[in-house]
Amino acid sequence: MRGVRWRRIAVRVGRGLTVWAVSTVTLLVLAGLLPDFRLQSAGGDSATRTAVTAACGAGAFALLSALVWPLLVRLLLLVPALVLGVLVFFLNGSLLLLALRVNPSGRAEVAPETAVVVAAVMSAVASATGGALAVRDDDAYRRRLARLALRRRRTGPPCATTPGLVCVQLDGVGHDVLVDAVRAGRMPTVARWLGAAPGGLPLGVPGQPPDGVRVPARNPAPPAPAPEGPATHTLTAWRTDWSSQTGASQLGILHGSTYDIPAFRWYEKERGEVVVCNRPTSAAELQRRAVERTGDDGLLALDGASRGNLFGGGAAEQALVLSIAARRRGRGTRSRAGYFAYFSDPANAVRTALSFGAEVAREIGESLTARARGQRPRVGRGGLYPLVRAFATVVERDVVVAAVMGDLLAGRTAVYADLVAYDEVAHHSGPCGADAAKVLQRLDRSLALIERAAEHAPRPYRLVVLSDHGQSPGETFHARYGLTLADLVRAGCGLHVPRRAERTRSGAEARNAVRAALGRPDPADGATPRERPAHGTEPVVLASGNLGLVSFPDVPHRMSREEIDARHPALLTTLADHPGIGFLLVRSERHGGVVLGPHGTEIPLADLDENPGPLERFGPGAADAVRRTHGFPHTADIMVNSAYEPEDGEVLAFEEQIGSHGGLGGAQSHPFLLSPLTLSPPVAPGEELVGAEQVHHLLRRWLRESDGPRVRVPGSRTAEPAAREQPEEPEEPEEAGEPEGPDGPEEPEPEREHAA
């Protein structure tokens, strides 16, 4: 036993010396290549003295990075996250300048601008070398996680031994997309959970997609091979409400209510404001309304953590949560505190910064390639979009995954995290494109990393992976017809239509996450200039994917069909007869509510079951979804759903998106739920999981199944399970400079944030 211990220590010392040696060589090479960086005196030195100078500089830089870097990042915690990402290089360069200044030889000199480059290369090389050495040591990464878990158990209160629940949301990944990715071998971790070999059809997944949703046959599935091992999870499709978007679905999942969420954005007449689900002020208000309606703090109120979400779910631990981003900064409202956990490691910071730059370059290259090939459909991908994409696919993903790993090692009872990478890319590259497929591969590796961290948690965990909606492909309404929905509405009202139609800006979820990371406030009334009517009598036209909303701000109540016809006789006919419109929903003084279609079709909501009319092509459940939305207080005067082609699954987005969601039609309404077999079945045989509120109750049921004795927490509306003593574990020696694991960055120490 003692021999094994000494052998382990020797391996670690050898690894540290190797990294030091490689860093020394890197300094020597850079000194020979860069004109403003030298390791010799002006008169020249011997090779030995130069090597000693390089070794001392590399050692001093490593020590300063380990000791000073976390303090610097903590001092800069209130700096916007993206700004901190840029400062990473300058801080690293400052540390290198300091390291060379304290060098005993006193011979090294470097220009400040060159120090930034040298420091970045040094950090990257040291990280890569450590990772390569860790790959050769199969247990290095597992020991790192075990040591972090042991440290948390010593410093924190004991946690319950009952199983915890971790929910990872893959934003925008539909049931059909997940099945197709498993068939094509892009998601080997998910395939293993489903008991399928890579490239094979997952066991237990129906051959036909739900409700006849078309799965593109881009990669014909070979005969299903024998499974690699027993399945550990089961795959279930569920159906959203009419509003198939993150705001409605995530509010329903975390807070148990999707009431009065008619779309991604809508106009509230009594307040004269546009509510947008991914704006911090709107998210905070929607969360408040949901808590008031349900009388419950949320799914995560019991020792929970919310990471990267629009809403907090009642969690005491919140990081990168949009609903608290607009509050006054305090101990419990620092939504960006999760960035400190990740950027406190200089290797992580440099790696993410370099990956960010690579992702920007990748997006620019892919966009130019699509344009050169004349790819259709296509939307603009210039401006700030490459930066937004890089934030969603690199920064947000890395920070959220690190935070979830910290939650696992802390033994929290319930964790819910959102990864928005796929959704952001699919909006602009298409849900079935090669760009989106590459993102799925990287998300699968993130799931494997979380699974590995769970193996070293102080309690068992059940890992649930789900999505909030899917995406439906198709060109934009503007691209097909040369005008926007707002132009069509103005024409039907007899108003002036601009000669050149302005495109409707995309409202993807990641954009306002970037604004929150930068600390930029919302517009005062929640509306952009384009969303404000030019005159009080002009309509407000808003878009949520392929769902449009038309409101007349000067009328305090929801207008009826009769009132709209009296005011604008041609409007409803113009909209209903347009080939790009699927159907309209309006209030009726005679029937309560009616669905309007082309050629004068008018069907009362009460008759939709017998005569679905234009809703028939939208599949089962469409009538129920429309009837439910009709009863919301803030449903628009006119609800407009785009046309839908069941043969190819395409819709026409009213925003600049070739992969859209928000309305009815196709895969956007069919997300997935991947749950462990150790949990009770999501639904009984023959039944269907419908609506985010049902998903909320399902997750609550699973939490109750693994719940232990409960004790009342003073000042809380909920109870929490009694903590149980943890068995003592032998302490492993601390390891300086432990490199990252073979599958990703090492897990940093997250800071505990207590939300108000």
Image (cartoon, helix red, strand yellow):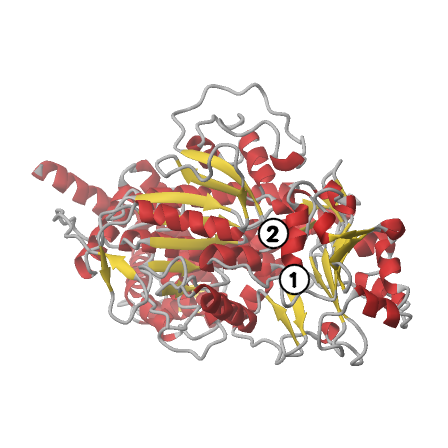
Name which of mark 2 and mark 1 comes first in the sequence: 2
> For the C terminus, which image quadrant?
bottom left
Question: Is there a contact, CB below 8 Å, between mark 2 and mark 1?
Answer: no
Amino acid at the residue labelled 1:
Gly
SS of the residue under disc 1: loop
In this figure, which residue is indicated by the disc labeled 2? Answer: 241
Amino acid at the residue labelled 2:
Asp
Q: Nearer the viewer, mark 2 or mark 1?
A: 2
Q: Position of residue 632 (x, y in %)?
A: 62, 63
SS of the residue under disc 2: loop
Q: How many marks?
A: 2
Q: Nearer the viewer, residue 148 or 666?
A: 666
For label 2, the crowd category at 10 Å Cα-Cα, with few meaning under 14, some 14 to 19 and many 20 or more, is many
Q: Position of residue 401 (x, y in %)?
A: 42, 52
> For the N terminus, which image quadrant?
top left
For image coordinates 52% across by 47% down, the residue present is 467
Res 658 seen here: no
Q: Is residue 723 left or right of residue 520?
A: left
Q: Is residue 65 left or right of residue 588?
A: left
Q: Position of residue 743 (x, y in %)?
A: 40, 43
Q: Nearer the viewer, residue 219 or 411?
A: 411
Q: Which mark is residue 741?
A: none
Q: Is residue 267 left or right of residue 448?
A: right
Q: Residue furthest left?
A: 2
Q: Nearer the viewer, residue 58 or 385?
A: 385
Q: Position of residue 424 (x, y in %)?
A: 60, 54
For image coordinates 35% across by 45% down, the residue present is 741
- In space, the residues marked 2 and 1 are separated at their CA atoms by 19 Å
Res 630 seen here: yes
In this figure, which residue is indicated by the disc labeled 1? Answer: 507
For image coordinates 51% across by 74% down, the residue present is 519
For label 1, the crowd category at 10 Å Cα-Cα, with few meaning under 14, some 14 to 19 and many 20 or more, is many
